[in-house]
């Protein structure tokens, strides 16, 4: 049982997160004890994004991912073709049983003493079994790899260590359809995506909450941080003629907001559509043939929604964070894994229509590479901030000062189309405040009983 | 072409029990038959190519006939020779 830390010195955790004033103490980003508690109270409990089913398409395929600070193996077993998530540690002495980022295998064999595990996690090989254990003393069935509970949600793979966690759909609440839409191909078909392999992995010297809590949705940063990239007009899909990196958006009756669910922690950009149909397609790609493909797919989607108002976020609509550490778009998935109080391991996964022609996939891959990751133009901008925030916040004096998250505070409202969420204006830090609300709840909760069912009453963060 | 026993026991190329047979072990193909130290005979059903383990199916097992047809893993020290 974890000993719940409720204060640092004479300051309570709850006092460090003042959502009435919109101030957050820097201490929660730089304190080692708080970090350790986050691993137990948050990452050992929550549903965490670990990968996509297309990364392990064949029996015996595996990839190495992370849950919090710990490595996990995502394995599609050879017999039943089911996807499993295992802690990457031998049950004998703890050595990693998988040293490769991805591959296909018959078994996971520990290089230390040779304990060997089937792709479904069962312990199937123990060296000197007869001599050392009399052939029966060791019950192999009790010593399989430590396995997480898994949910395959329209191709996205999620896992939790906590057997008492609520169902994944309850966990994500009204955001569940948004995740589903992100996993649809551009014509609106479920399970329509694949992820480019290998994925990008790199480490940055900052606390996981700096990018994880702050970058979705943060419209103000785009105006300043990415101003130079916007001026350079590197893409995404080429210069639109006005010096902006943003693609031209067709006018369509819709309204985009920043939203946050203070009871569940999720939040980010959200678009409500006001009439049936989908926005007109606008040619934006430099590479020949790509616009033709996306136009055809858009037409198929338009046919499906010709008499139906598309659900919110059904056609893009900004990125959003699924509590605690992954940000979704329809074209990229960005988990930030804690790797120590001042270190974060970033993954970048880029979905693309799995049935798209190769030239479309190539164009999409080139675009996301020049945009994202450690050498991507835009995330290079972001890293300048993420990496300097941490050292500039951890000094003796600096850590006593609060961060300001007041933008558009107490100006939210509710909308029955997105229950549980506070809707806020487009330039707002409501989504970030929602994550800190949930952060305090998790850090203080003794069990899931304290966290679910969520509070159903008046949302105090609304006006 | 796989050269059974090529780097193993040079006095008896079929012998596999020695540690220096790791290369041979790594390259044993599916379908090959091996005899275990307890007298059982098995067919290789998979080779993880780590030089130490083989996936097998028992064809004969005088010690325990109920094991015939059962899948198992076998460590190199328990393998006597190729059949």
Image (cartoon, grey):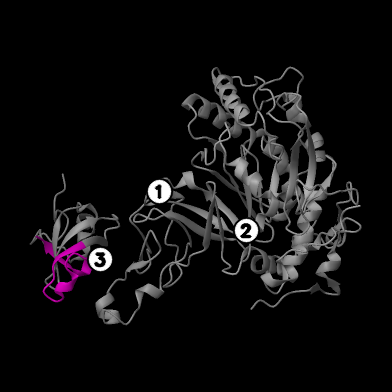
Q: Is residue A215 visible?
A: no
Answer few, some or many: residues within 10 Å of disc 2's Cα (few below 14, many 20 plus, some between 14 and 19): many
Residue at numbered disc 1:
A103
Front residue of A378 and A176: A176
Q: CA distance from mark 2 to mark 3?
A: 38 Å
Instruction: State left or right for residue B70 relative to residue A61.
Output: left
* 2 or 1: tag closer to the N-terminus: 1
How far, Cα to Cα, is label 3 from label 1?
Answer: 23 Å
Q: Quadrant of the N terminus of chain A?
A: bottom right
The magenta stretch is B57-83
User: Where residue A377 sits: x, y (%)?
Assistant: 67, 33
What residue does disc 3 label? Answer: B72
* Image location (x, y in percent) of residue A60: 37, 52
Subunit of mark 1? A
Label 3 environment density (alpha carbons within 10 Å; few <14, some 14–19, many ≥20): some
Quickly name the residue at label 2.
A339
């Amino acid at each position: 049982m974890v000993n719940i830390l409720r204060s640092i010195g004479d300051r309570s955790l709850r006092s460090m997160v003042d959502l009435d004033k919109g101030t957050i103490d820097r201490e929660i980003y730089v304190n080692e004890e708080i970090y350790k508690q986050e691993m137990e109270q948050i990452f050992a409990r929550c549903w965490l994004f670990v990968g996509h089913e297309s990364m392990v398409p064949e029996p015996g395929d595996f990839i190495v991912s992370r849950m919090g600070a710990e490595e996990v193996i995502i394995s599609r077993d050879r017999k039943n073709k089911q996807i499993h998530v295992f802690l990457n540690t031998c049950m004998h002495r703890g050595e990693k049983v998988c040293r490769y980022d991805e591959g296909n295998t018959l078994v996971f064999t520990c290089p230390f003493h040779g304990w060997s595990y089937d792709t479904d996690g069962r312990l199937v090989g123990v060296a000197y079994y007869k001599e050392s254990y009399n052939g029966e003393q060791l019950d192999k069935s009790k010593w399989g790899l430590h396995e997480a509970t898994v949910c395959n949600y329209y191709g996205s793979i999620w896992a939790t260590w906590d057997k008492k966690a609520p169902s994944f759909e309850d966990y994500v609440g009204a955001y569940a359809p948004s995740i589903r839409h992100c996993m649809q191909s551009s014509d609106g078909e479920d399970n329509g995506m694949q992820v480019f392999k290998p994925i990008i992995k790199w480490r940055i010297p900052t606390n996981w909450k700096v990018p994880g809590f702050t970058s979705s949705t943060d419209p103000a940063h785009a105006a300043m941080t990415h101003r130079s990239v916007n001026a350079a007009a590197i893409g995404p899909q080429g210069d639109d003629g006005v010096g902006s990196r943003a693609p031209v958006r067709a006018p369509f009756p819709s309204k985009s907001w920043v939203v946050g669910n203070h009871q569940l922690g999720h939040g980010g950009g959200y678009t409500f559509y006001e009439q049936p149909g989908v926005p007109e397609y606008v040619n934006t790609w430099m590479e020949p043939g790509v616009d033709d493909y996306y136009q055809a797919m858009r037409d198929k989607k338009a046919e499906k929604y010709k008499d139906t108002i598309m659900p919110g976020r059904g056609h893009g609509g900004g990125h959003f964070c699924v509590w605690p550490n992954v940000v979704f778009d329809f074209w990229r998935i960005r988990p930030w894994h804690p790797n120590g109080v001042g270190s974060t391991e970033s993954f970048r996964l880029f979905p693309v229509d799995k049935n798209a022609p190769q030239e479309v996939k190539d164009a999409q891959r080139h675009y996301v590479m020049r945009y994202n990751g450690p050498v991507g133009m835009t995330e290079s901008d972001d890293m300048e901030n993420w990496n300097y925030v941490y050292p500039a916040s951890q000094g003796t004096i600096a850590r006593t000062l609060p961060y300001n998250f007041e933008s558009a505070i107490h100006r939210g409202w509710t909308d029955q189309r997105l229950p549980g969420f506070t809707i806020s204006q487009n330039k707002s830090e409501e989504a970030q405040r929602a994550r800190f609300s949930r952060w305090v709840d998790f850090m203080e909760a003794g069990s899931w009983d304290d966290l679910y069912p969520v509070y159903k009453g008046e949302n105090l963060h609304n006006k | 072409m796989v050269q059974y026993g090529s780097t193993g026991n040079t006095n008896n190329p079929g012998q596999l029990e020695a540690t220096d047979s790791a290369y041979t072990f790594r390259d044993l193909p599916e379908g090959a038959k091996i005899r275990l130290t307890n007298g059982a005979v098995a067919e290789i059903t998979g080779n993880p190519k780590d030089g130490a383990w083989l996936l097998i199916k028992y064809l004969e097992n005088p010690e325990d006939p109920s094991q015939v047809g059962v899948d198992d893993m076998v460590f190199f020290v328990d393998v006597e020779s190729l059949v």
